[in-house]
Image: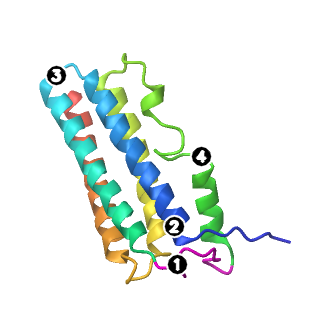
C-alpha cells in the first residue's frame, strides 16, 4: 500500500523560494572568488536573476487563497508528490543543502560553471513538476517564464564553459 504524500501550494512555493534564495547565494559566493571581472559580473548577474525569481515566487505565494494553502494530494498516482518529496529532502537541487556553503574558494571557473549547470538543470526539473501543479490563476505562466529563464542560464553557463577550453 502506497502512502500518499501531500503538499499544499504554500509549501511548494516555499520550496521554490528556497531554491532561488540558495541559487542567488551560490552565485554571489562564487563571484567573490572569480579571478576575472567578466566572470565575476556574469555570476553577479545570475544572482540578480535568481533574486527576481525569488520575488516572483514570494508574490505568487502571497496571492494564495485559504483553500490553496490547505493540504491536498495533487495526483492520483502520487508521482508528482513523491518527486517533490525527494526534492524537499534535499536530494539534487540547488536549494536544500546550500551549494554556496560547499564552496572552498579554490574552485576553477570551469568547476563553478559545472556546479551551476547541474544546479540549474535540477531546478528546471523541479519547476517543470511544479508547473503541472499550479493553476493558471495561481501563476502557471510565471512558472513557465522562470523555466525559460533557467534554461537560458544553462545556455549562458555552457557558453562560458566552452569559452574556457
Q: SS at mark 4? A: loop
User: Seen from this angle, which residue lies furthest left?
Assistant: 38
Q: Which residue is mark 1?
A: 68
Judge the density around disc 1: few (<14), some (14-19), many (≥20) Cα neighbours within 10 Å.
some
Residue 19: x %, y % from top left: 44, 50
Q: Which mark is residue 36?
A: 3
Q: Which mark is residue 91?
A: 4
Q: Earlier in the sequence, mark 4 or mark 1?
A: 1
Q: Residue at x 26, y 35 (%)?
A: 161
Residue 32: x %, y % from top left: 27, 24
Judge the density around disc 2: few (<14), some (14-19), many (≥20) Cα neighbours within 10 Å.
many
Q: Residue at x 37, y 35 (%)?
A: 26
> Which quadrant would residue 83 be assigned to in this image?
bottom right
Check if mark 1's residue and mark 2's residue have beta carbons within 8 Å.
Answer: yes
Q: Earlier in the sequence, mark 2 or mark 4?
A: 2
Q: Earlier in the sequence, mark 1 or mark 3?
A: 3
Q: Earlier in the sequence, mark 4 or mark 3?
A: 3
Residue 28: x %, y % from top left: 29, 33
Q: Which residues are magenta?
A: 65-76
Q: CA distance from mark 2 to mark 4?
A: 20 Å
Q: SS at mark 2? A: helix
Q: CA distance from mark 4 to mark 1?
A: 26 Å
Q: Which residue is mark 2?
A: 10
Q: Residue at x 69, y 77 (%)?
A: 77
Check if mark 4's residue and mark 1's residue have beta carbons within 8 Å.
Answer: no
Amino acid at each position: 500500500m502506497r502512502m500518499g504524500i501531500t503538499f499544499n501550494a504554500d509549501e511548494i512555493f516555499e520550496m521554490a523560494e528556497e531554491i532561488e534564495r540558495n541559487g542567488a547565494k551560490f552565485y554571489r559566493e562564487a563571484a567573490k572568488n572569480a579571478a576575472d571581472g567578466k566572470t565575476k559580473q556574469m555570476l553577479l548577474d545570475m544572482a540578480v536573476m535568481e533574486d527576481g525569481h525569488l520575488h516572483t515566487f514570494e508574490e505568487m505565494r502571497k496571492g494564495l487563497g485559504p483553500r490553496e494553502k490547505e493540504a491536498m494530494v495533487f495526483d492520483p498516482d502520487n508521482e508528482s508528490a513523491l518527486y517533490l518529496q525527494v526534492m524537499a529532502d534535499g536530494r539534487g537541487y540547488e536549494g536544500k543543502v546550500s551549494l554556496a556553503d560547499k564552496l572552498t574558494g579554490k574552485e576553477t571557473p570551469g568547476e563553478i560553471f559545472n556546479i551551476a549547470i547541474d544546479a540549474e538543470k535540477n531546478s528546471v526539473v523541479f519547476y517543470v513538476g511544479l508547473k503541472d501543479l499550479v493553476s493558471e490563476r495561481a501563476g502557471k505562466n510565471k512558472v513557465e517564464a522562470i523555466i525559460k529563464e533557467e534554461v537560458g542560464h544553462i545556455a549562458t553557463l555552457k557558453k562560458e564553459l566552452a569559452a574556457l577550453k
